[in-house]
Image: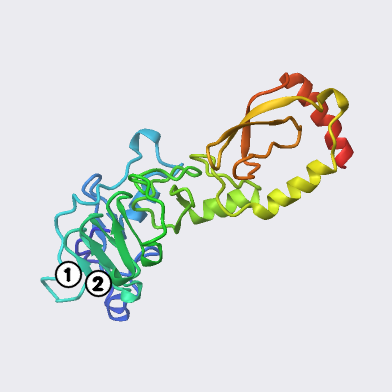
Amino acid sequence: MESEVEKNISSTELESGNSGCSHYRRRCKIRAPCCDEIFNCRHCHNEAKNSLETNLSDRHDLPRFEVKKVQQYCVNCGVCMGKYFCGICNFFDDDISKDQFHCNQCGICRTGGKENFFHCDKCGCCYSNLMADGHRCVERAMHQNCPVCFEYLFDSTKAITILHCGHTIHFDCLKEMENHHQFSCPVCSKSICDMSELWKKFDELIASTPMPEIYRNKMVWILCNDCGGKCQVQFHVIAHKCLDCKSYNTRRTQGPPAAAAASFSANVVEMVR
C-alpha cells in the first residue's frame, strides 16, 4: 500500500487512470525497501516473493511502513498518484468508489466509508455499524490467523465474517467448510449458525434407530460444545443430545468401550442405508 514515483509509466496510462494492478488503481509504483525492486503494490511484491518459484530462504513480505519516498503529487510534472492518499499508511488508490478511510485505532486504511463502521477496542478492529449492539466481543479477535487457511486476518484484503461465537474467519473459507458439511467453529467448536432444523432430523433418525438390548441401559456423560453444559444421557451410536440446550453438538466424556461402539456403528450405517 506504499508508493513512490515510478518514471516509466506512459502518458496514456497517466491520462486514462488505468495504471496500477489487480489490487489497486494508481499512477505510481513502489520501490521495496527490503529488496530494492520495483512493484505495482505491496501485494504484488508479496505474491512474487512468496511464490513457490522463489527460494525458501528468499521469501519475505514487504515492510509496509518502511517506504519513505511518498507524496501524492509528482514534483516534476504534477501528476496525482491517486485521488485517495494516506500519508500515515503511505497508501495511494485512484479508485475512490471504495470509500477508503484511515482508522487511527487500527493504524491502517480500510474501505466502506468511515460513517458505516465503528472500532471495537476489545476486538481490536473496525466492524460494521450493524454489529454495534449485537456482536460478541473476543479480545483481539481480528489479530489472528484464519483458522482454515492461516492467513493473517487483520489486514487481509479478502472478505471476513464473524461467527456467532465471536471468532473470525474468511468468508470463502466458511463457505468451503459448509460445502464439506462442517458447521462448528474451528476455534471453539460452537455451532456457526442456527442448527435447530438439523437437530430435528437427528431426533427423527435416532427415534427410528433403536439401540440393541445390550446397549439400551448404557449411560454416558457428554459435554455440550454450544452451551458448555455437562449431563448424563442414554448412549446412542449416532449422536447425543444436550439436555440443557437440546443441541447435538456434543462430545462424549465417558461411555462404553470405543471398540464396541465402533462395531455397532458399522451395523447402524448398514441399517440406515
Residue 243 located left or right of residue 216? left
Scheme of image coloration: rainbow
Q: Quadrant of the N terminus?
A: bottom left
Label disc, if present, on residue 82 of the rendered structure = 2
The residue where tag 1 is placed is: 72
The image quadrant that residue 216 belongs to is top right
Residue displayed at 27% across by 52% down: 121
Mark 1 lies on a secondary structure that is loop
Residue 184 located left or right of residue 15? right
Residue 225 located left or right of residue 53? right
Count every numbered label the image shows and give the total: 2
**Label 1: how many Cα within 10 Å (few below 14, some 14–19, many 20+):** many
The three-letter amino acid code for the residue at tag 2 is: Gly
Asked if the residue under mark 2 is in contact with the one under mark 1, i.e. CB atoms within 8 Å, the reply is yes
Q: Quadrant of the C terminus?
A: top right
Mark 2 lies on a secondary structure that is loop
